[in-house]
Amino acid sequence: MSELGESPQQVEIVFEYDPHYQLIAANGIWGGLTPKGDLRIDFFVEYQAAPSPGSHTYQPTPDGTVEEKSKPEKVRKVVRRLQIGVLVSPQHIASFAQWFHEKAQEVEQLRKPAANKEGKVH
């Protein structure tokens, strides 16, 4: 057992899943600084909205069937469904940004061989 004030020579980090943990999809983020200086990040999934009820009309045909007569929608609707929000303390923002940057570089390295193969002419 170490004396009070001594630093341990090793630290073991154990990862555990919270009982409410879930893996969610996200293809965008939105957020900003809170009044207390934390960074609020809302992860969302963006997709084109389904047509609203009544946005289509149908016309009867002489043979008794119906033919759809779509009304062109005047505005294209895009839904951003917020999946989860995360608050990051000011002292951790830079390390989170560095982690994201490192992951972006890893993705670029994985893409380079594929781009080189596609661009070669034999």
Image: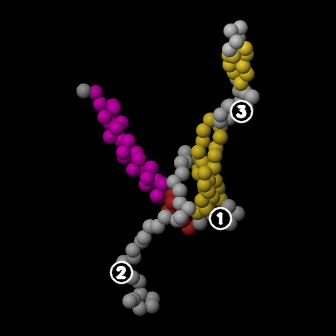
Name the residue at 36% across, 78% down.
10
Name the residue at 64% across, 55% down.
32
Q: Is residue 57 left or right of residue 10?
A: right
Sort mark 1 into few (<14), some (14-19) or many (20+) by Cα contacts within 10 Å. few
- What is the secondary structure assignment of the residue under circle 2? loop
Name the residue at 56% across, 67% down.
91
Quarter occupied by residue 14:
bottom left
The numbered mark, 3 or 2, whose residue comes first in the sequence reads 2
Q: Main secondary structure of the magenta part?
A: helix
- What is the secondary structure assignment of the residue under circle 1? loop
Quadrant position of the C terminus in the picture: top left
Report which residue position mark 2 lands on: 9
The numbered mark, 3 or 1, whose residue comes first in the sequence reads 1
Magenta-drawn stretch contains 40: no
Residue 60 visible somewhere in the drawing: yes
Sort mark 2 into few (<14), some (14-19) or many (20+) by Cα contacts within 10 Å. few
Report which residue position mark 1 lands on: 37
Report which residue position mark 3 lands on: 52
| Residue 55 x/y as whole percent | 73, 27
Q: Residue furthest right?
A: 54
Q: Residue furthest top?
A: 62
Depth check, mark 3 against mark 2: the one in front is: 3
| Residue 23 x/y as whole percent | 51, 54
Q: Is residue 27 left or right of residue 74?
A: left
